[in-house]
Amino acid sequence: MMSSDPAITIPQPATHPGTPAEPPRSGLPGHIAIIMDGNGRWAKRQGKPRTFGHRAGAITAREIIEHCARRGIGQLTLYSFSIENWRRPVEEVNELMQLYAQYLVSERELMNRNNIRFRQIGRREGLPDDVLREIDQTTALLDANTGMTLCLAVNYGARMEITDAVRAIAREVQAGRLRPQDIEPDTVSSHLYTAGMPDPDLLIRTAGEMRVSNYLLWQISYAELYVTDVCWPEFRSADLDMAIDAFRHRQRRFGGLQSISPPD
C-alpha cells in the first residue's frame, strides 16, 4: 500500500499554463541522463522509511523535468528502476511500482501542457499490468508533442540491453538479412532500447557515488560526467543549473586534440 505519511505527497498538475521552453542556447547539452541516487539515505537521515525517500524523489523529478523543458533541453532520461532493483525487499519494490503508475497518471496533464513527449526504455517483461497500461497510455497521449522527450528507464540494465541487441543482430545474421562483416557501431545502436534517440551529452549522478551502475553503458561513451553529493530528494533546479554550467565550461574532444562535435 502507499505510504500514508502526509508530509510527502505526489503533487497534482498545476492549474496554470505551462511555461514555454526557452530557445536552445549555445553549449547546452542536448540530452541529459540522470542517476537519481540517495532516496533511501536521505529518508534514513529524516528517521523515515525508504519509501518516504522515493516519494520525495518523485517530487524532485517533477521539478527537474519542468526545468529541463523550460531550458530547452532536447531529452531527459531518468534512471527510475534497474533490473537489479528487483532484489530489494518485496514491500519496497511494490511501493516503487505503485508510485510509478501513480506518477504517470498525475503528471500526464502537466507534461502535455509543457509539450513533452514520453518514452520508456527497459524490458516490459516482469512489469505489473497496471504499470504497462499507464506507460502505454502516457506514451500515446503525449506522442504528438514536439518539445522535450522525457525517457524513463524502468526495468532497465545496460548489459541486458546490449545482450538483447546482440541476440537481435544474431537472428538477422542467421536469417541471412545481415552479413557479419556489415555489422558496424550504428548497427548495434539501432538495436538498443534507445534506437532513434541521441546519446547523452551529460550524465549526472546524485548522492556522491562514483560509478555508472549499469546505466546506458553504450550510449555514454562520450558523455561528460557530473557527480554531486546532494541526494536526489534535495536536488533542485539550481543544482541542475550548476551541472549544466560545468558542462558548458568543458572542452569535449572525443579523443582528438581540439574541441569538436560528437562523432557520427
Image (spheres, rainbow, N blue to C red):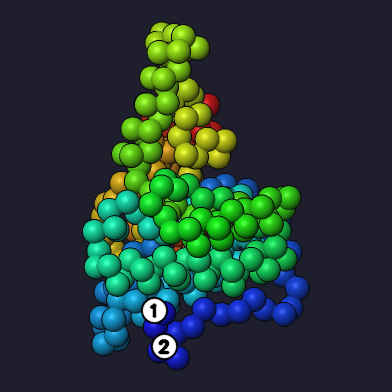
Please identify the quadrant where the N terminus is shown: bottom left
In the image, what residue occupies the spot 44% across and 52% down? 153
In the image, what residue occupies the spot 38% across and 52% down? 126
Q: Look at label 2 and name its amino acid.
A: Ser
Kindly state the secondary structure of the residue where label 1 is placed: loop
Q: Quadrant of residue 235?
A: bottom left
In the image, what residue occupies the spot 52% across and 35% down? 195
Q: Which mark is residue 4?
A: 2
Rendering coords of residue 202 (x, y %): 46, 49
Front residue of this view, candidates 58 and 203: 58
In the image, what residue occupies the spot 41% across and 79% down? 2
Kindly state the secondary structure of the residue where label 2 is placed: loop
Front residue of this view, candidates 194 and 219: 194
Q: Are marks 2 and 1 in contact (CB under 8 Å)?
A: yes
Q: Is residue 49 left or right of residue 3?
A: left
Q: CA distance from mark 2 to mark 1?
A: 9 Å
Q: Which mark is residue 1?
A: 1
- Residue farthest along the bottom direction in this orientation: 6
Rendering coords of residue 119 (x, y %): 56, 50
Q: Nearer the viewer, mark 2 or mark 1?
A: 1
Q: Is 165 placed above or below 173 here?
A: below
Q: Look at label 1 and name its amino acid.
A: Met
Q: Which mark is residue 103?
A: none
Front residue of this view, candidates 1 and 193: 1
Front residue of this view, candidates 250 and 85: 85
Q: Is residue 180 left or right of residue 16?
A: left
Q: Is residue 69 left or right of residue 39?
A: right
Res. 154 visible in picture? yes
Badge 2: residue crowd in 10 Å (few <14, some 14–19, many ≥20): few
Badge 1: residue crowd in 10 Å (few <14, some 14–19, many ≥20): few
Res. 72 visible in picture? no
Rendering coords of residue 12 (x, y %): 61, 79
